[in-house]
Amino acid sequence: MSFTAALHTLGSFVSELPASQLCLGAAVLGLISHHAYFIHGERDAHVWTYFLVLLGTPSMLAALLYLSTAAGLSHTVSTVTLATTSFLSAMAASIFVYRLYFHPLSRFPGPSPTRLSKLYYIHAYTQARGQYFRVQQRWHAQYGDIVRSGPNELIVLRPELLPVLGKAAKGSWYNNGNRNSSIQLVKDRETHSVRRRVWDKAFTPDAVKAYAPRVKHYTDMLLEKLAEGEREKDITAWFSYYTFDVMGAFTFGRDFGMLEKGGRDGSDYFLRMTHASMRSIALLGHTPWLLLLMEMLGAAGKEHMKFLEWCKERVDDRKRRGMGEMGSDLFEVLLEAEPKNIGPHHVPLRGDSRTAIVAGSDTTAATLIALFTYLGSSPETLSKLQAELDSLPADSTESPYLSACINEALRLNTAVPSGVSRYIPPEGVTLDDGTFLPGGVNVYFPLWVAMRDERWFDNPEEFCPERWLISTPEKLAEMKAVFQPFWIGRYQCVGRPLALAELHSVGAAVARRFDISLVGDRDAAFAKTIDTFTLEMGEIRCVFTERLL
């Protein structure tokens, strides 16, 4: 039988099937698709294939029926619609029944919609005006320490799980990196280890020490800008200009000119574009298949797509300038290793540039903004810090009380508030109370919630630097068990030494030179914060008055 004759026979067979048999056959295929394929592992990376199949298969079936039989157009359309609807309905029903009653996580409590689909996250995030960490806090108050937040996802507020998560594989959120990989997003452990060894060269103690004069240069520039003109300043803007310029110089050997121009003349373009891109990721990132599909369709947000292209342009510009032009920077290290950045462990420079800027600037800026918001609304704490700094050599940042203030800012306003996505190891984990967490489950440890929990922090909502200085060793150990603002284990933030250097440099210099008072209410200031994976701070204003020393 020829191919054409076979198609004609198949088309005739489908066309002549009674509607009930057609529906049944399509439904059986839907059930088989779920249980034989979709139920086994993640499928985010293949979303484009599924999208094309979903569009193409009904069209091909319609063409087959129409061209190989005498059926009219209306009969063809109704037949294909019936078959497609039966297939998708049966598969969806199978998925929902499995997730509700037979999934290994079916015994864990949580909002009903999250058991069916992670799409509910988009609703919860939007309703909370971007403060997903508060959603997590409400869920834990309602459901307990373990909350089912997705079909295959738990939020677990148990410190004993942290050492396990510190060694665990990256979870489903990192599927967002399938098209735009970076050291942050890459999931393969060996690839990450290879790339991390390259990055570590830029963050050795000697490398960070050598970068100290440049940090001081931008700190001095920030001080002058805070002293100029009106005493009332938008600290969200100025501390962001500072951290983005520092990271621009550290990453590419050139700053963005934000501090110098005060964000004028488009100098803050990258800052605005970064935040717009991160908002797209925040909204869609918990459903990686949807973000990947939107990116492929060019519908992930104009600013998000511009941001990706802008990162590529910065990489191309830095490549053209070659080695050693501006002294040591991150890209000098990356470009030196680029000839070996090939094969299965290749990570594109564009992705690494995005990671360096976002992870190194947004996070540090958020902490500085929080630090001075608290100091500006806590006169006694500020005076105590100034007294200790005044007793030290002029340029010293070795202040235990300053370190305690920074710890409190990191605790109350941690830079990645909702936590990071990790997989429970295949063998599963048994918690201290005997609760068993199945292997392969996507898990978050909610950092913002944990670091405001009265089980581990006395008066957890209070800004109290003294807790880090006068607590008993036992209490200090309890606090440190959950105090992980830079994460823990193999994926701990590589830029931690530089971030702490910036925080101490600016914290000491600004507190030494200025008396600071917050404009308005502190709670109202933090109410404008948005969780975009990192924290995006709303406008917060402080008055800076030069001290008479």
Image (spheres, helix red, strand yellow):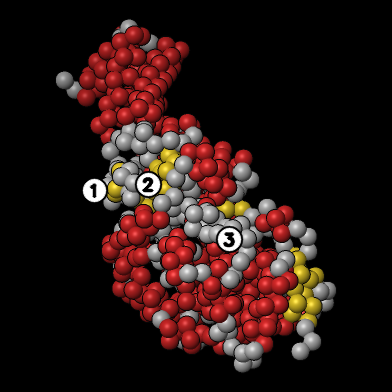
**Residue shown at 61% from the left, 53% from the top:** 530
Q: Which residue is mark 3?
A: 412
- Can you tell which of label 2 and label 3 is closer to the viewer? 3
Which residue is outermost to the right? 230
Please indicate whether residue 108 sits to the left or right of residue 525 in the image: left
Q: Residue at x 68, y 83 (%)?
A: 387
Where is mark 2, residue-wise?
A: 442
Query: Which residue in the protein does label 1 denote?
Result: 427
**C-alpha distance separating marks 1 and 3:** 34 Å
Q: Is residue 58 above or below residue 495?
A: above
Number of numbered callouts drawn: 3
Secondary structure of residue under mark 1:
loop
Instruction: Tell me the amino acid under the disc marked 2.
Output: Asn
The residue type indicated by label 3 comes to Leu
Disc 2 vs disc 1: which is toward the camera? 1
Query: Is 314 placed left or right of 339 in the picture?
Result: right
The secondary structure type at the circle numbered 2 is: strand
Q: Could you classify mark 1 by the number of other residues whose Cα lies within 10 Å: few (under 14), some (14-19), or many (20 or more)?
A: few
